[in-house]
């Protein structure tokens, strides 16, 4: 079966994010970018399923600027078979992502779409759910285990109260949580091999999709600086401070 995996290019999680001086967003120029960590987990999952003989082809998709090709190449160096870049310079919000992906799904007819549970830049946690809704497909968000079982998949979801086990009919949308797997490192020979894998570049207009943003960012600002801590002599003093100064109890 064919699997579609989405990969978003985001600011490297180990980079300290700086707010632009005009408060319109965060600085991305000359900043190290990388594949969204949850998308890495999604790619790894598809590869493991291919290695297990469950999956025959892995197509990776990214939506964004031309440099997203690097993210797609990384996914192909991990083991994906081919890539599709839907190239656009502007901001792409979750509803637009879901609409673009629906158009790609209509074209590619995968049996499974694996996405990250959330992008660590906007932390929206919406695109997978919106895609499933647009397609009218079953979904499993926050997935920590998946086993394909004929025309269905047995999934485990990380929910507030613990773990939820479900059987969902395929085709379906699955979003990957942290504990699904530990992604592999890419090797130099595989990076070289990935350069020869097919990468298609298309524009959103060619898919007939309107990706205009629906939300406006009013202002982005740094979180307030944390004050320094104080040492208390005993529990009595701590309780008093929590009551009278912090006013949390
Ligand atoms: P979000 O809803 O923004 O938190 O993103 C959830 C997941 O949707 C991400 O982990 C990606 O797998 C996918 N996604 C979101 N934006 C993009 C994008 N621009 N290109 C490719 N995949 C995306």
Image (tube, helix red, strand yellow):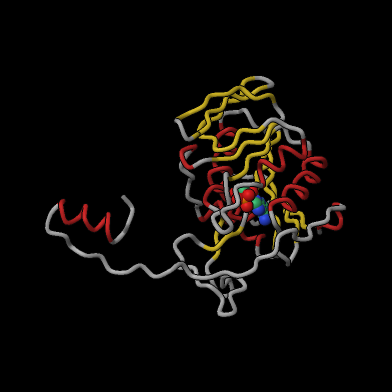
How many marks are shown on the rendered structure?
0
Seen from this angle, which residue lies furthest top?
150
Q: Is residue 7 visible?
A: no
Q: Is residue 30 above or below residue 175?
A: below
Camera-side residue of 214 and 86? 214
Question: Is residue 242 or residue 209 the one in the foreground?
Answer: 242
Residue 225 appears in which quarter of the rendering? Answer: bottom left
Quarter containing the N terminus:
top right
Residue at 69%, 52% (x, y): give it: 94
Residue 231: image location, x then y, percent: 17, 62
The vertical placement of 35 against 3, above or below, is below
Residue 176: image location, x then y, percent = 56, 40
Residue at 62% x, 20% y is 149
The extreme bottom residue here reads 21
Task: Classify residue 84 as left or right of residue 143.
Answer: right
Residue at 49%, 45% in the rendered image: 183
Q: Is residue 106 left or right of residue 189?
A: right
Which of the pair 244/7 is nearer the observer? 244
Q: Position of residue 220 (x, y in %)?
A: 57, 69
Q: Quadrant of residue 30?
A: bottom right
Residue 83 drawn above or below residue 245: above
Residue drawn at x 82%, y 40% as measured from the top left: 106
Residue that extends furthest to the front in the rendered view of this protein: 244
Residue 132 in picture, x, y percent from top left: 71, 37
Residue 29 visible at all: yes
Q: Quadrant of residue 129?
A: top right
């Amino acid at each position: 079966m064919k699997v579609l995996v989405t990969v978003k290019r985001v600011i490297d999680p180990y980079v300290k994010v700086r707010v632009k001086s005009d408060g319109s967003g965060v600085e991305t120029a000359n900043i190290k970018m990388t594949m969204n960590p949850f998308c890495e987990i999604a790619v790894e999952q598809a590869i493991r399923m291919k290695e297990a003989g469950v999956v025959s082809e892995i197509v990776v998709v990214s939506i964004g600027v031309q440099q997203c090709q690097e993210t797609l190449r990384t996914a192909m160096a991990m083991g994906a078979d081919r890539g599709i870049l839907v190239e656009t310079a502007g901001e792409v919000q979750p509803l637009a992502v879901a609409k673009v992906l629906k158009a790609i799904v209509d074209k590619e007819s995968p049996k499974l779409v694996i996405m990250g549970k959330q992008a660590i830049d906007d932390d929206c946690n919406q695109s997978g759910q919106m895609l499933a809704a647009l397609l009218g497909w079953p979904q499993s968000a926050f997935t920590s285990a998946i086993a394909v079982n004929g025309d269905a998949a047995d999934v485990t979801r990380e929910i507030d109260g613990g773990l939820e086990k479900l059987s969902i009919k395929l085709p379906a949308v699955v979003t990957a949580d942290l504990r699904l797997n530990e992604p592999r490192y890419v090797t130099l020979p595989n990076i070289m091999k990935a350069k020869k894998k097919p990468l298609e570049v298309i524009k959103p207009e060619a898919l007939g999709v309107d990706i205009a943003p629906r939300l406006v960012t009013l202002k982005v600002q740094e979180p307030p600086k944390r004050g320094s801590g104080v040492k208390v002599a005993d529990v009595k003093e701590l309780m008093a401070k929590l009551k009278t100064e912090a006013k949390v109890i």
